[in-house]
Image (spheres, rainbow, N blue to C red):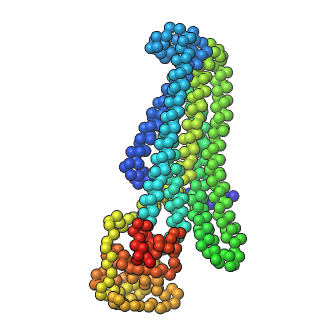
Amino acid sequence: MHPVIDTGGRPLSELLPRLWAHLSRRRRRQFVAVVLAAVVSAGMEMASLGSVLPFIAVLVDPDMALDHAIVARLAGVLGIESTRDLVIPLTVGFVGLAVVAAGFRLAVLWLGIRFAVATGADLNAEVYLRTLHQPYPVHMSRSSSEVISGIVDKVEVVGGGVLYPIQCIITSVVMIMAILITLMLVNPLVAVGTMIGFGGAYAVISVVSRHRLRRHGTLIAEKQTLVLSNLQEGLGGIRDVLLDGTQPVFTESYRQVDRPLRRAVGDIQFIVTAPRFVMEAVGMIVIAVLALVLSRQVGGVAGALPVLGALALGGQRILPALQMAFASWSMIVSKRAHLDEAIRLLEQPLPEGYDEEAPTARGVDDVVRFRDVSFRYAQDEPWVLEGINLDIPAGSSLGVVGGTGSGKSTLLDVFMGLLTPQEGSVSIDGEVLTDRRCRSWQRAVAHVPQHIFLADTTIANNIAFGFGEELIDVDRVV
């Protein structure tokens, strides 16, 4: 039995416009440019495919080649009277068009990947910026694994797992339309039948697999956070793990979370890849049946060979395009939960004046005053601080003593402006500690945390935490 996974959440029809709103103008223009490049590439594919029919006709029956309007027009332009002399020009033209079409496909692929990577970097940086600017209570209410997983796993896949697949779908649709138009010029009935057969098959597969893709995608999004949480707990408490010998406990906990995630990833890969092999077999069958039917018409196999060649090449082009569209659609559906979380992170509010130059540090000259300060972490929880009245003169020393949970840390957080009291006020030299005043006050506060954080860098960088290398005053550090 599969675990019950809540696949609810906002639909893609709501999430995708929200994602578009977070793209910069530059990225939007680049997106449009990639789509236009895909249209040009589709035109080259159409020309390349259209050259197959006259090319094969000249090879099969040079004397009948001039019956084709394209061949006759080309012969007139080149001043060629003998059909035998058309073989080399047509060969060169066919090869040239194929090479140019391949070049355009590579260009579109390169542009699409570059766009997805650059956009992913923009969104990751934007989410990190917004997360760092969230008020302290927001950070206290979140687990670090939730935040890190959101930035590293959820937002990271938006570029490669949503935006790039959207481009691939647009490219595939344009390519399919161009190929179909070309095939319609060759044999309308066969072209329509082929598209209905292949397109219908992919449509059925999409409907059948949609719910499974969403369920697996939601499971992956949930388990990624739990995997990171397990790693943080085991490695963060490594001293206790080593002393207590609880390695098997943490290993098994990790395995119980990681195994369903890997299985879901594998199932999605199978759903995305499997239709290709089925459709290739169906394509071979269709070509064989068409060859049999067309060979019984007037002209026999020789007369049907140009048409079969064009259809075979068209099928060779249209099947990968259909598979790409299906795989891209599957990727987007399976990443819906990731996109939902990424949008929530992108829509975190930014404080007023966050991008302004940092204010000058303003400490205390007279007194820090608490007046009837009360604070609690939630409306339904008891007061941690209640009715606190306190004067702290400039230059004085104060010790706060109390048992665990008595509010010592909370009092200091209110003092530093990290927490805002629900009742009462804190003032510096008679000026109430508002949001704007808080920034200049915090720049004057020196803070030694209860739990020391050491960055993986030099001692100087740890002492001057948050300052760039070029801004560190070595004399002050020493």
Q: Quadrant of the C terminus?
A: bottom left
Q: Quadrant of residue 472?
A: bottom left
Q: Nearer the viewer, residue 405 or 413?
A: 413
Number of marks present in the image shown: 0
The percent position of residue 401, horizontal first and vertical second, equals 47, 91
Q: Nearer the viewer, residue 263 or 34?
A: 34
- Give above or below for 26 relative to 61: below
- Give above or below for 48 relative to 419: above
Q: Residue furthest left?
A: 430
Q: Nearer the viewer, residue 346 or 461?
A: 461
Q: Residue at x 44, y 40 (%)?
A: 35
Q: Residue at x 37, y 49 (%)?
A: 25
Q: Residue at x 53, y 33 (%)?
A: 102
- Give above or below for 143 relative to 388: above
Q: Quadrant of the N terminus?
A: bottom right
- Give above or below for 6 relative to 116: below
Q: Quadrant of residue 126?
A: bottom left
Q: Residue at x 69, y 78 (%)?
A: 244
The percent position of residue 188, horizontal first and vertical second, equals 53, 24
The percent position of residue 199, horizontal first and vertical second, equals 57, 36
The percent position of residue 227, horizontal first and vertical second, equals 61, 64
Whether residue 67 appears in this view of the structure is: no
